[in-house]
């Protein structure tokens, strides 16, 4: 358990808070580039700051404060032009740094625009995903994790805002045992409620060694980028990739499951942007052209209009996870928890958070801050399918990303194209 003070320290993310300052040292994903195709100005709230993301007429990106300093009109209704975003009220225009560059009603030659600047943060796009950096300059390099730079894959991006604190979502990533219960037995219960009992244990059949996910052994190891999570399930052994390779939690807020990244981005103290980024390996000897645009899909929350659980939306992993996260409260009270031996991964992760906070507060550089371009060409992470990516994909394990499997456009297309193959039969989880 944590004290109330410790819980505050690890959960609060606004400007000036310890965790907020740590998170500001990292590039955080804020949306998909394809989201701006039809609506080129998007509201973004990140680490407690309210901003607008825009794409100008030249295709450049900007992330600036959401309020015009002239008369406090929302810049969400700004007009993108070639060199920036123009306020709809009086035409003041701001470039991507937040600098005012035009005031149409002021006298020609006035220096007034030079003295007006709003918040502006650097943004970069990588494989269709837009990242923002809110920390001190100089900004580090945007990490080129392997799936962002792989050749010969198809990609898509899903997202939703989950109404709870980021930490209870991340801690789920260090909790292997919940899989056999929440995504196994509870999943069976949901299917029974929905009158679909014939589909029970489909999850186990799709991915489990020996058709079972009863855990016999779990393990955690720190590595250069974070923590590796391992498991042995009933009928398995240490030779299985789930133990021999495991899958990584990348510090501070990224989980990798197969060829799927899951970012848990703090919007504010009580809301989290959850991003699913998936790269789909293709069959050997198949060449796919790079995508002109990486498609984006919105993941629905599994709740009804009055906040009650919509059971039809919890027949999949992500729906089940979201219910578990949200029902802990907006910010889980860890001073009341009772942790056991099976929670050692959560304890390790909290220790890592404390260690990196201490490094930052001592004036040092926390882990996973990259500044050497030659070391950032492709940052390879261990993953269970690394020995046979296509074989891993065919087993259907990527479907266990839940909503991201149920709604992902590229995956739906792949399943339709391969209809009839035994490995991809059955419901998409």
Image (cartoon, rainbow, N blue to C red):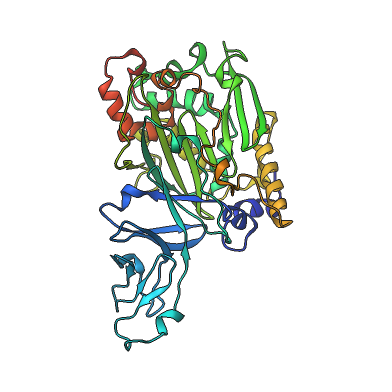
Q: Residue at x 47, y 59 (%)?
A: 122
Q: Which image quadrant: the N terminus? A: top right
Q: Is residue 428 left or right of residue 334?
A: left
Q: Nearer the viewer, residue 144 or 420?
A: 144
Q: Is residue 151 left or right of residue 421?
A: right
Give residue 231's position: percent from left, percent from top: 60, 22
Give residue 198's position: percent from left, percent from top: 35, 16
- Does residue 315 appear in this view? no
The picture quadrant where one finds residue 42 is: bottom left
- Outermost residue toward the bottom? 107
Look at the picture and state if 204 lies above or below 168. Answer: above
Q: Nearer the viewer, residue 80 or 267?
A: 80
Q: Which image quadrant: the C terminus? A: top left
Q: Residue at x 30, y 42 (%)?
A: 293
Q: Nearer the viewer, residue 398 or 369?
A: 369
Give residue 12's position: percent from left, percent from top: 59, 56
């Amino acid at each position: 358990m944590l004290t109330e003070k410790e819980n505050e320290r690890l959960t609060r993310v606004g400007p000036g808070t310890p965790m907020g300052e740590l998170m500001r040292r990292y590039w955080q994903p804020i949306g998909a580039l394809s989201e701006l195709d039809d609506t080129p100005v998007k509201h973004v709230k990140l680490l407690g700051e309210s901003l607008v993301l825009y794409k100008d007429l030249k295709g450049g990106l900007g992330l600036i404060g959401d309020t015009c300093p002239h008369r406090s009109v929302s810049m969400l209704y700004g007009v993108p032009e070639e060199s920036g975003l123009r306020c709809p009220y009086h035409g003041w225009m701001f470039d991507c740094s937040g600098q005012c560059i035009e005031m149409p009603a002021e006298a020609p030659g006035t220096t007034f625009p030079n003295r007006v600047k709003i918040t502006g943060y650097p943004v970069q796009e990588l494989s269709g995903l837009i990242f923002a950096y809110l920390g001190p300059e100089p900004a580090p390099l945007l990490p080129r994790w392997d799936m962002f730079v792989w050749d010969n894959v198809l990609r898509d991006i899903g997202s939703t805002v989950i109404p709870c604190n980021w930490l209870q979502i991340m801690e789920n990533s260090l909790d292997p045992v919940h899989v056999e219960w929440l995504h196994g037995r509870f999943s069976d219960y949901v299917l029974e409620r929905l009158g679909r009992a014939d589909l029970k244990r489909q999850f186990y059949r799709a991915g489990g060694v020996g058709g079972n996910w009863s855990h016999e052994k779990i393990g955690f190891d720190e590595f250069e980028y974070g923590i590796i999570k391992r498991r042995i399930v009933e009928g398995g052994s240490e030779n299985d990739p789930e133990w021999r390779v495991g899958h990584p939690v990348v510090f501070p807020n990224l989980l990798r499951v197969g060829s799927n990244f899951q970012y848990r981005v703090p919007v504010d103290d009580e809301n989290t942007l959850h991003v699913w980024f998936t790269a789909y390996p293709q069959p050997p000897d198949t060449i796919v052209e790079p995508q002109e645009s990486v498609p984006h899909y919105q993941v629905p929350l599994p709740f009804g209009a009055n906040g009650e659980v919509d059971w039809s939306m919890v027949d999949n992993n992500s729906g089940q996870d979201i219910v578990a996260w949200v029902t802990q409260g907006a910010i889980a009270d860890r001073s009341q928890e009772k942790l056991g031996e099976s929670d050692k991964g959560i304890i390790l992760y909290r220790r890592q958070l404390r260690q990196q906070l201490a490094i930052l507060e001592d004036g040092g550089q926390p882990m996973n801050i990259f500044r050497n371009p030659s070391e950032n060409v492709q940052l390879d992470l261990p993953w269970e399918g690394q020995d046979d990516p296509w074989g891993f994909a065919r087993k259907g394990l990527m479907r266990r990303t839940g909503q991201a499997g149920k709604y992902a456009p590229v995956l739906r297309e792949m399943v339709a194209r391969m209809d009839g193959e035994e490995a991809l039969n059955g419901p998409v989880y």
